[in-house]
């Protein structure tokens, strides 16, 4: 690729959610900096588009269509990465879903689906990746949210999953620190992606409670800004950072 920045030369990365938004931007950024990237998502068309962008710029990538609700698929993304490049240095669990509901509207089915995609899939991918990351002294970055740091009205399912992602990541950071595998989370506030464009809001929400989700800065983040933070945390520049949950929210949680 054209970038002269090669922080990830000879590195192999597995990025879920790579068909869209933050996952797509992250995969492109890592490939620009020299990584070979396995692009994983349920959206085959989106994956093909991300792959084309990377390849047109001279980067290395491959795709794996997977459904994060399926354990065999989650194991499969790791197997496919190892089969392709024989090693794994960086894992980004970025695929996720969100929708806003009043408590009385929340179905058990929606709860279980959200837990599977946002929390169980990252756990399985961390578990399957860990033996490979121990060999390379690699690192994991799980995409949490400001919803992993505070309560959000009408968003309790998502908030529970993202608190879980932070708990999972901190615990793995402790468990694997002596083996030099770093595990961190990123906690974005509002980011301009399809997730927000297609967001399902609850009806009759209290505006005062929803207003707590707004950044203090007068814009939302671009996906590329989250990707830049991901690249910083995944690189050797952050070799002393583990167990962190790094907020990037335009001041949302400060106010
Ligand atoms: N956009 C925001 O404001 C924001 C804020 C905080 C955290 N996040 C988190 O960032 C991550 C990425 O979100 P985004 O904003 O880029 O959204 P996005 O909708 O653009 O991308 C999410 C990706 O996840 C994939 N996905 C959904 N269900 C899947 C499944 N069952 N199996 C495999 N892939 C599946 C989608 O196909 C999509 O490509 C999510 O974990 C989200 O919770 C986003």
Image (cartoon, rainbow, N blue to C red):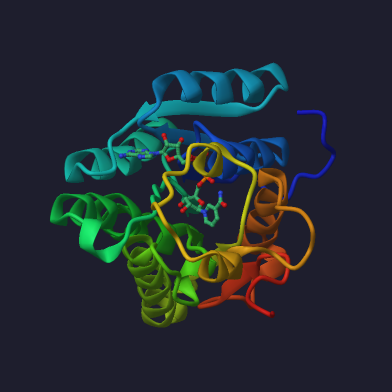
Q: Position of residue 3 (x, y in %)?
A: 82, 36
Rendered view: 202 above or below 45: below
* Image quadrant containing the C terminus: bottom right
Residue 35 placement, left or right of 251? left
Q: Position of residue 35 (x, y in %)?
A: 62, 40
Closest to the observer: 251 or 200? Answer: 200
* Image quadrant containing the N terminus: top right
At horizontal 44% and vertical 26% (from top left) the residue drawn is 63
Closest to the observer: 53 or 1? Answer: 53
Q: Position of residue 67 (x, y in %)?
A: 28, 36
Rendered view: 247 above or below 5: below
Residue 82 placement, left or right of 110? right
Q: Is residue 115 visible?
A: yes
At horizontal 47% and vertical 33% (from top left) the residue drawn is 39
Residue 144 placement, left or right of 155? right
At horizontal 44% and vertical 45% (from top left) the residue drawn is 87
Rendered view: 71 above or below 217: above
Q: Position of residue 104 (x, y in %)?
A: 22, 62
Q: Quadrant of residue 108?
A: bottom left
Q: Is residue 181 visible?
A: no
């Amino acid at each position: 690729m054209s970038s002269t920045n090669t922080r990830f030369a000879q590195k192999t990365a597995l990025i879920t959610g790579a068909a869209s938004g933050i996952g797509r931007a992250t995969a492109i950024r890592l490939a620009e900096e020299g990584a070979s990237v396995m692009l994983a998502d349920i959206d085959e068309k989106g994956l093909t588009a991300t792959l084309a962008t990377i390849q047109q710029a001279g980067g290395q990538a491959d795709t794996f269509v997977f459904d994060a609700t399926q354990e065999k698929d989650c194991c499969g993304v790791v197997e496919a990465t190892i089969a392709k490049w024989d090693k794994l240095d960086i894992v980004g669990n970025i695929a996720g879903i969100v929708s806003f509901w009043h408590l009385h509207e929340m179905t058990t089915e929606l709860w279980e689906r959200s837990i599977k995609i946002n929390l169980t899939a990252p756990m399985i991918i961390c578990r399957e990746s860990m033996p490979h990351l121990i060999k390379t002294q690699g690192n994991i970055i799980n995409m949490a949210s400001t919803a992993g740091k505070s309560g959000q009205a009408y968003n309790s399912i998502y908030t529970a999953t993202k608190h879980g992602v932070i708990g999972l990541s901190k615990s793995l950071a402790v468990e694997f620190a002596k083996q030099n595998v770093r595990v961190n989370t990123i906690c974005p506030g509002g980011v301009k992606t399809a997730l927000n464009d297609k967001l399902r809001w609850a009806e009759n929400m209290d505006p005062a409670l929803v207003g707590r989700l707004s950044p203090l800065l007068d814009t939302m983040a671009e996906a590329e800004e989250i990707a830049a933070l991901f690249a910083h945390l995944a690189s050797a520049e952050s070799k002393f950072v583990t167990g962190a949950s790094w907020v990037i929210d335009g001041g949302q949680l400060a106010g």
